Image (cartoon, helix red, strand yellow):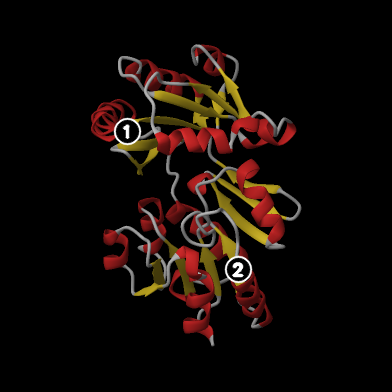
Amino acid sequence: MFELFITDLDGTLLDDNKQISSLNIEAINKLRKKNITFSVFTGRNFYSAYKYLKALDIEGLVALQNGALIIEMPSRKVINEISLKSSIAKNIYQLAKKNDFTFVGYTGYHESNSNCNKDMFVEKSNKKSQAFDFYFQHNKERITMLNTMDSFFDNRKKIGQLAIIGQESLLWDLLKTVTESFKNEISHVLSPIGDDYGFLEFFGPKVSKGDALSHLLKQYGTTAAKTVFIGDNYNDLPLMKKVGLPVATENAQRDIKDFCKMVVSNNNNHAVKDAIQKIFF
């Protein structure tokens, strides 16, 4: 019998309009009535995830920023936070500057929580991409534009994460160089975003959704074998490899679907409700 159900947000619980369907919410509430613990593991930071955590009325632990931040809701108590050293982030930035990339620095939880309107600092590329222009437009109230990222790094000892957006092939080249230089001091996620562009994120050491699971297992006195996780992207794979029942949405990457033990409907067709219904009812 499964005791813990975890869902990703984007591409899974959220539809393409970034909404949670009423059918998904109804299914989650039914799950709670069976005393199954419900949680969210997302790549989003606290500021961008908070309205969804609030709408879901979550009480308990959630994992944000791919596991870099574990907090308890609704108190917002920090259980664990892994930061990226600003000095390392600046070195990565300097290695990457020769390419026409867009750079995004995210403040840590405590800084963004006290000044939640401005938690993203951006040095933008001259190149145009519809995929990430939409991302910036959607998050414009959070952004401070910079001519150079140097001041962002110099003004703080640690940050939440550094993201670099650009041509995917160039990002792979950069990633190889960076991992050779900072192997034990960083974690990373590289996600395709369309138009042959990628979104490369750097975190502090030992950050992944898979590593974050141990905090919930300890808190709730359960095991990975009794855990279900539903997701859609490559950053979900470390957690999928640990849980007893990994579930993919129909819109997930092919490699993700091939790995998972169950594939349910897509994120625009109530994927979380479909998974809950098939597994628990």
First in residue order: circle 1 vs circle 2: 2
Residue type (three-letter) at the residue carrying disc 1:
Lys
Kindly indicate the quadrant of the structure image that contains residue 172: top left
Q: Which quadrant is the C terminus positioned in? A: bottom right
Marks 1 and 2, how far apart in space?
A: 34 Å
Residue at horizontal 49 percent and vertical 12 percent from the top: 148
Viewer-proximal residue among 268 and 223:
268
Write down the residue under mark 2. Answer: 38
User: Residue 146, relative to residue 9: is it above or below?
Assistant: above
Residue at horizontal 52 percent and vertical 59 percent from the top: 15
Circle 1: element type: loop
Q: Position of residue 69 (x, y in %)?
A: 57, 45
Residue 1 visible to an observer of this rendering = no
Horizontally, residue 109 falls left or right of residue 162, namely right
Write down the residue under mark 1. Answer: 183
Residue at horizontal 55 percent and vertical 54 percent from the top: 17
Residue type (three-letter) at the residue carrying disc 2:
Phe
Q: Position of residue 268 (x, y in %)?
A: 49, 64
Rate crowding at label 2 as few (under 14), some (14 to 19) or many (20 or more) other CA atoms within 10 Å: many
Residue at horizontal 52 percent and vertical 44 percent from the top: 65
Q: Nearer the viewer, mark 1 or mark 2?
A: 2
User: Residue 148, relative to residue 259: is it above or below?
Assistant: above
Viewer-proximal residue among 22 and 5:
22
Circle 2: element type: strand
Rate crowding at label 1 as few (under 14), some (14 to 19) or many (20 or more) other CA atoms within 10 Å: few
Q: Position of residue 31 (x, y in %)?
A: 62, 78
